[in-house]
Amino acid sequence: MTSIVEIHDLVKRFAPTPEKPEGTLAVAGISMKVEEGEIFSFLGPNGAGKTTTISMMSGLLAPTSGDVSIGGFSITKQPLEVKRLIGVVPQEIALYPELSARRNIEFFGRLYGLEGKELSARCDEVLDFVGLRDRQKERIDTFSGGMKRRVNIAVGLMHRPKLVFMDEPTVGVDPQSRRNILDAVKLLNEQGMTVLYTTHYMEEAEELSNRVAIIDHGKIIGIGKQIELLQQIGEKDRLLIKLNPETTAQAAEVAQKVKGVDKVNIEDGKLEILSSAGRRTLPLIITELDDAGYPPLSIEIVEPNLETVFLHLTGRALRD
């Protein structure tokens, strides 16, 4: 396959502040490729460096060092050529609230150089695509959060980009709008568009992605197809054990000593236990907890998923 994105040792360190005189290292030397025609997801918690990476790739931030090639053009040496190839759906709503949906889309379409019949036709197309043709004359400030995000998507598609960046597009939206957005991402990809998608929702990355890069503290700690990432941890199960909140920390120490337990994490008052033989190990864990005076209140066995991979790689849950 042909790479549409090639990232070479990308680094971003923000300027020193009184609180952090050494500056903040937001992206710590990322190198990777995105293949043409795939949905590629950056998966990681808030503050992991996902948005900073997207901002550098789209020309909103200058890298401290390193470079990105998009469609053969360098973001540092040929930024205008890069911007002609990409569409950006930012994490924050980037619309004029006092204008209608159509006026917003037309405004940004003109910035892309569209005009006349072509501008009108493209506006109709993207409004149909996001399902807002019947609401096109209404002001943005009357829209729900999900509808605003759909207009954001429409703006990013006006010039038919080869590659679209979608930065946490479902944050804060209702379930129906979220479903519409995820379906739109799939449809865009079916039509041949490459999508680079960032999220901290594990289930979105699992549903959408051809490949996933797991990001934490500005570094890629795992990358590949989902099956490849799961193979990194073997056939491990994730056990969720709810206990008396006052005894969870002590119970974690007991569970960590049980044979067959690989890692123990405390999350939302529960023990999260990673084990390569969860079903065989569970009775031993329960016995040890009971004997120590920490009887479980509820137990759940979760099959391996991307959150299990994150827990294995970092020692903490993706939601942290």
Image (cartoon, rainbow, N blue to C red):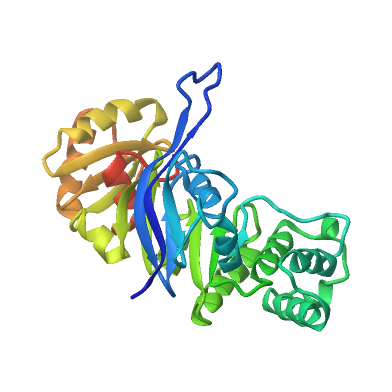
Q: In the image shown, does 258 or 105 lie closer to the viewer?
A: 105
Q: In the image shown, does 162 or 48 lie closer to the viewer?
A: 162
Left or right of residue 165, residue 67 in this image: left
Judge whether 246 appears above or below 13 on screen.
above
Image coordinates for residue 151, horizontal then vertical, percent: 72, 65
- Residue at 53% from the left image edge and 57% from the top image edge: 78
- Residue at 56% from the left image edge and 55% from the top image edge: 58
Quadrant where the C terminus is found in the figure? top left
Quadrant where the N terminus is found in the figure? bottom left
Q: In the image shown, does 243 or 58 lie closer to the viewer?
A: 58
Of all residues, the one furthest to the left in this rendering is 259
Left or right of residue 320, residue 124 in this image: right
Image coordinates for residue 142, horizontal then vertical, percent: 85, 58
Q: In the image shown, does 233 or 151 lie closer to the viewer?
A: 151
Count of numbered labels shown in the rendering: 0
Q: Is residue 308 visible?
A: yes
Of all residues, the one furthest to the top in this rendering is 18
Task: Specify the quadrant of the image occupied by residue 224.
Answer: bottom left
Left or right of residue 18, residue 292 in this image: left
Image coordinates for residue 99, horizontal then vertical, percent: 87, 60
- Residue at 72% from the left image edge and 54% from the top image edge: 94
Judge whether 73 appears above or below 267 on screen.
below
Task: Specify the quadrant of the image occupied by residue 225.
Answer: bottom left
Image coordinates for residue 220, horizontal then vertical, percent: 34, 48
Q: Is residue 300 visible?
A: no
Judge whether 120 appears above or below 263 on screen.
below
